[in-house]
Amino acid sequence: MNWIKIQNIKNIKNQKSLHDTIANRISKKLAEEGFYNFKIDSISIDSPADSGKINITLIINEGKPTLIKSTSIQNPLPEKDSLKIMPVLRSLHGQIFSKQIIENSISRIINYFENSGFPFATVKIHSVNFSSGPPGNGHYAGIVFLIKKNQLGKIDKIQIEGNTKTKAGVIIRTAGIKPGELYSESKIAGIPQRLNRLRFFEKVGKPEFYFNSKGKGILLIKVKEKQTNFFDGILGYVPPSGTNGKGYFTGFANVKLGNLFGTGRVFAFKWLQENRYSQELELNYLEPWVLDYPVNFKTGLYQRKQDTTYIKRKIGGNIEYLTTEEISASVFIVSESTIPVLGNNNKFTVFNSNSISTGIELKIDTRDNPLAPKSGLLFVNSYSYSSKKINGPEQFLTPQTQTVTGLQRLQLDFSFYYELFTNQVVQLSVHGKELRGNSLEVSDLYKFGGTNSMRGYREKQFSANRLLWSNLEYRYLISEFSYAFLFFDAGYYLRNKDEQTNTPEVSDVLKSFGLGFSLESALGILNISYAVPQGAPVSKGLIHFGILNNF
């Protein structure tokens, strides 16, 4: 009955018109499926009195399907093309002569030409010769195709529209195509995804290709720029708790200057005052495509004052080689120093130390959209080795602690995205970190918990040398970059026993669940979630706020 699809039967004036409509639609559908030798024995239409319904009874003999016996090409083609096309046509032999099967083969042939420099190639059925075998042996069709390559598609010029800020050279470089190349459908179709990864534009559509009045091939890329500079900040004041106490300021500032001077350069600044004694400062800069080679250079400064125990400072650089559009490899070097803060009680906190870390990183990113992916994966694996020198405080040094120690760090991050239904995406991520070495201090350990790891727990609530956690989210996309989500987090952390500081071994398994929203705003992608840790009542959950770091 899906073939008939008559919704308003009452509007058909008489049974003969209804009979003809049903017969025509069934005949058309049977032919599309390859049944050309069918017979409609009868169509009965009955309308019981006062029922308001119409009963339709069909008796059909569909017969045997018509099979494809032979295929050929009306016009001669170069041998190179024939070697690619004839196997496609021969694969039709013995198959049912149906619309879908024929169109699939034509699509394969057109794809071949489009990726060989002929974007306007056409494939048509020139003629069909039907035949029948002996009685009971079936029906056959011989197909003759007419194939035209048409004009060779050479990209003589790349034209950019809509870029008021971004330099055309940056867009062309990212598109991965140059003037003088032959048209390639697969390469052209991948341009929107490559440009969207820059995060400088609204969603980019597929470029257009045409020949101008002089016969030159023009590739037109249209973009619409969006805001790439963001500022977010808040300032608070905590009044004194007593008559002799002093008040203090807390606050947060996050500044990102993206696509500086239209060149793709990025600068980011972050400042966080958590409480009276804890403060964090971070500066980052990205120089893309150094000297027009597929090499990115990143440098940054990070400083954290942790309560009244120590100050940690890092400065380093990263050179990333873009192997392909989706794979990159990096080498990095980081200089790090830890400065203990000794109070009046002269109590040991951490050693004064310096270290140099070198490492490598491999990254695979096939996500269709880096901000709200519907499909693809992100894999990051890094290893670093640190040579650490302990300098003091002098009163706590021993012959063992004055030696240079080595620290090894291994990090693995994997995220997978899959669209189950329209605008409904499942995201599964697994993360692991491992720190190995002797004389581990609290300043060396990983900080764990909060918005970017285990929701439902305080930011940086746990310190550990081994971490493993996963995040499972079910997302419903509201717009391109905004979605609501349900989540379940599970994690494990371990902090080894430290005899020097008399610290016992600590480990635990954590779980949490909740819901949230990720919203596109003028400040960036704002993430808000409510998370309930394992064993706590729903009313005791934590609210997490965060802005996606686009650096």
Image (cartoon, rainbow, N blue to C red):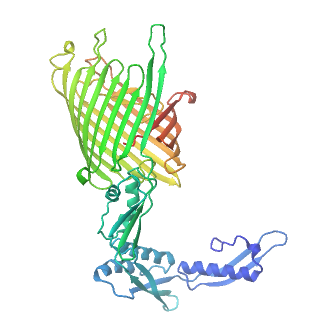
The percent position of residue 499, horizontal first and vertical second, equals 26, 18
Classify residue 93 by image quadrant: bottom left
Percent position (x, y) of residue 133? Answer: 48, 91
Q: Residue furthest right?
A: 50
Q: Position of residue 404 (x, y in %)?
A: 16, 26
Q: Is residue 232 left or right of residue 12?
A: left
Quarter placement of the N terminus: bottom right
| Vertical position of residue 205 compared to residue 86: above or below | above
In front: 87, or 187? Answer: 187
Write down the quadrant of residue 272 in the picture: top left
Percent x, y of residue 442: 30, 23
Locate residue 336: give its quadrant: top left
Query: Which part of the image, by quadrant, shows the C terminus?
Result: top left
At x 52%, y 36%, the residue is: 514
Is 483 left, or right, of 42 in this rendering? left
Q: Nearer the viewer, residue 28 or 256?
A: 256
Residue 275 seen anywhere in this rendered image of the structure: yes
Image-based side of 374 in relation to 308, left or right: right
Q: Residue shown at 77%/76% (left/top)?
A: 46
In the image, is residue 106 above or below residue 291?
below
On screen, 9 above or below 476? Answer: below
**161 or 547: nearer the eye?**
161
Please determine whether, in this image, residue 504 is positioned above or below residue 479. above
Q: Is residue 460 visible?
A: no
